[in-house]
Image (tube, rainbow, N blue to C red):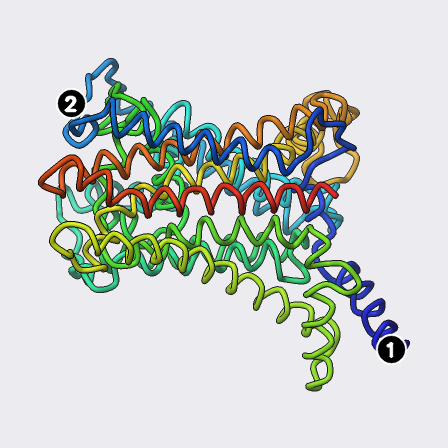
Amino acid sequence: MRRRLAYGVAAAVAAATLLPGSAAAHGLVGKQDLPIPRWLFAWAAAVVLVLSFVALATLWPRPRLEDVRARRVLRAPVALEALCGALGVAAFAAVVWAGLAGAQVPTDNLAPTAIYVVFWVGIPFATLFVGDVFAAFNPWRAIARGAAWVFTRATRGGEPPAPLAYPEWLGRWPAALGILLFAWVELAYVDRDDPSQLAIMAVVYAAVQLVGMALYGIEPWTRNADAFANYFGMFSRLSALHWRDRALYLRPPLAGAPALTAVPGTVALLCVMIGTVSFDGLSQGSLWIATDGLAPDLQQRFVNLGFSAETAAQIAYTVGLLAMVALVSGLFWLGISGMRSVGRGHPAGWLARRFVHSLIPIALAYVVAHYFSLLVYQGQAMGYLISDPLGDGSDLFGSASTTIDYNLVGANAVWYVQVFALVVGHACGLTLAHDRALTIYDRPVEATRSQYWMLAVMVAFTCLGLWLLSAAAQ
């Protein structure tokens, strides 16, 4: 018993030492003094979803989001599009330069905070309010379009070689794999905070995107294979603002989600988006990191197989990451399988493609719930990092002496934002699923019956999200 306890303590210490030190920033900051127990929040959230389901069944008798016309409110000049692209390239270059040339201390270097906080977390928040901002600033897309423009000018109107046809079977699988790999770097890779390694990986990713665009065309590759373009693009479908052909359109919130084309890999992409964030929450709780938790036990098992402590820790976290993605996928497919018993018994794969867009608000809800505190607190670090990006004592904009104010938002306020995000996100998922069901089933009563299963899935996702948040806050 003592030997096992010693192994557990050693494994926990090794995991805490070897794995990302800033991962704790993803959880809640400060002690909460909630007026009611956390478990009561889960019951209240489930009741809200049930009431939302009843309201949809009685007050939403016909589809309202499937064929919505957007109203154009603004047209942007070509120069603005070029300027946004140039700014995106400049920001990308600055992050890479800081990562390679700056101090190799994560908290002093611009690259880790810019990538993990501003890019990974900040853009989804901005996208919800102003539409797909990443599409305008996408640096590798801007480079590819600039290269095509230069080629056309240099050849006096000549056309570049015709691209290959993007394989239909490949679909969004590259994007799903890309998001999974990024999450692995963030959550499992030992050197995830190393500025130079992050810069090198950013350059490699950009190079892969440029090669893909050269082979298959800029837009087909971006639309299908660019992991971050797809990731941020999914969230932009929930926004009331929609950018298309240098014009800004206004549409009802959520109306962009039903237009999602569910090519191969779309279901996998959304399950990866939810599952990876779920594992981020799990990895902060006692079930995972306690001395008798899953991580130390898994790590020790791999150590016993001959792996080093560092490698064993990475493998353990990789197993946990994949397991959580599999759990999320299983919950979704369980709901889809239950829907087959209603109506004409549509094939499961067909139903999954028709209802996968209902996962988009859930994915965003998980991002808001798990990363809100990270954005609020660590996002303030950009105030001094932009003045001293290399960590060499510079003060370019006079803000190098600013600090992070951890009293900006209280722990209770963070918790309420998280709960609100989860409940609203899952209610929006129910709305999208109900609206789509009305177009598939002949009778409204069948559409409602089919969504019993989706309601169960949404309640399960909500309770899972609240449990992960509660575990991380302990």
Which residue corresponds to the image point at 53% horizontal and 27% vertical from the top-left?
420
Residue closest to the eye, 390 or 192: 192
Q: Residues within 10 Å of mark 2 (few under 14, many from 20)?
A: few
Residue 241's quadrant in the figure? top left
Residue 380 higher or lower than 140, as above or below: above
Which of the image's four quarters has the C terminus? top right
Whether residue 124 is situated above or below residue 193 in the rendered picture: above
Q: Which residue type does callout 1 highlight? A: Met
x, y percentage for residue 5? 86, 72
Q: Are marks 1 and 2 in contact (CB under 8 Å)?
A: no
Secondary structure, mark 2, is loop
**Residue 352's x, y, as percent?**
26, 53
Q: In the figure, is residue 71 to the left or right of 22?
A: left
Q: Residue at x 24, y 45 (%)?
A: 450
Amino acid type, mark 2: Arg
What is the CA distance from the residue labelled 1 to the residue labelled 2? 67 Å
Question: Looking at the rendering, which quadrant does residue 454 occupy?
Answer: top left
Residue of label 2: 69
Instruction: Identify residue for label 1.
Output: 1
User: x, y (%) of residue 183?
Assistant: 53, 55
Residue appearing at x 68%, y 79% in the figure: 302
Q: Position of residue 103 (x, y in %)?
A: 74, 47
Q: Does 80 appear above or below 137?
A: above
Q: Secondary structure at mark 1?
A: loop
Q: Nearer the viewer, residue 385 or 66?
A: 66
Residue 422 is tagged as none
Report crowding for label 1: few under 14, some 14 to 19, many 20 or more residues within 10 A (C-alpha): few
Instruction: State which tag comes first along the sequence, 1 or 2.
Output: 1
